[in-house]
Image (cartoon, helix red, strand yellow):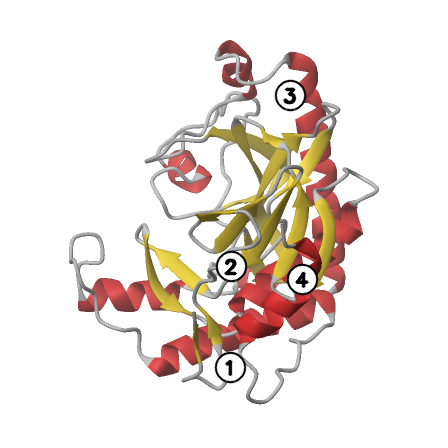
Amino acid sequence: MTDGGSALETLRRTDFDDLGERIEGKVRDIYVQPDRLVLVTTDRHSSFDRIVAHIPGKGEVLNRTAAFWCEETRDILPNHVIALPDPNVTVARRCTPLRIEIVMRGYLTGVTSTSIWTHYQAGRRDFGSFVLPDGMRKNERLPVPVFTPSTKEATHDETITPAQVLERGLLSKDLLEQVEDAAQKLFRRGQEIALSRGLILVDTKYEMGLDADSRLILIDEIHTPDSSRWWMADSYEARFAAGQEPEYFDKEFLRRWFVDHCDPYKDAVIPAAPAELVAELSARYQQIFHRLTGQTLTPRESGRPLAERIADNLAAYRI
């Protein structure tokens, strides 16, 4: 299903009946085949555990940003990518996902109850696998990037220490060491490349899995606007010295609009997002994509539905 009412058509969902079993995620439509997955990244925008809007071009931005980073980091860790037959599609190897999510943090920041800054501000210094000194300020660069794994829960992920990963039998010691080493290297590469583009990679999430030969593989997305926090590098030092918040890639303004106009957790029906906010968020996704990769969105063929283009490009993957 698509929507042509915006300057860019939006991809809301797909329903191909010849690509295998379809599983609908928050953003991706996943088609399961015997030895591979066909991952179609839509323009769905999720907040409050529900879809709140459809952002033109977002799916392509996420898919192609992840593809860019997979190519830039394949010397560090193999990834699941087999092919990119369409700007919105990745064909990937099937892997067994690890039972943890990997979070890398480079700065003392965050506003949620689980954020590292919230805990630090409340007096915590010992975070299990690392200890922070007294006297640090919000948004300060950490002495070294820190590896903070979390559980994968249906309702709420729990941040745990590497020691707890072992205690709970989530990973073996050898595999945990591989995961942390790979995560540190991926994050370092991401920070280096981002800085050369005038951006700071503040923190990010990784997903890893094991392939059929039990090799560690990078899966899902990497260093996208949805999985990572980004600040502008050129103004960071001056703003930090002045006690100001960094300039950042902000997609939360749409979330804040919903909070101001309804109860998005409880209301069965929520208002439609204003067109000008949807357009602004679309522009911001495209801006950070261009800044990171130097690329622009694929030109659309006049009058041709986006789903039709995708279907044609996936002809070789029908089963």
Q: Earlier in the sequence, mark 3 or mark 1?
A: 1
Mark pair 3, 1: CA separation: 43 Å
Q: Which residue is mark 4?
A: 315
Q: Nearer the viewer, mark 3 or mark 2?
A: 2
Establish if 182 lies above or below 190.
above
Residues packed near mark 1 inside 10 Å, few (<14), some (14 to 19) or many (20 plus):
some
Q: CA distance from mark 1 to mark 2?
A: 22 Å
- Tell me residue 219's x, y (percent): 64, 41
Chain-order first, disc 1 or disc 2: 1
Indicate left or right for 264 with 123 as reference. left
Q: Is residue 108 above or below residue 230?
A: above
Looking at the rendered structure, the kind of residue marked 4 is Ala
The tag earlier along the polypeptide, 3 or 2, is 2
Left or right: where does residue 268 sit relative to residue 205?
left
Q: Secondary structure at mark 4?
A: helix
Q: Is disc 1 placed on a helix, strand or loop?
A: loop
The residue beneath circle 3 is: 176
Mark before the other along the chain sequence, 2 or 4? 2
Which residue was labeled with disc 1? 8
Which disc is residue 16 wearing?
2
Q: Number of callouts in the render? A: 4
Looking at the image, is mark 1 or mark 2 nearer the viewer? 2
From this view, report whether residue 32 is shown above or below residue 215: below
CA neighbours of label 3 inside 10 A, class few (<14), some (14 to 19), many (20+): some
Is residue 68 shown left or right of residue 312? right
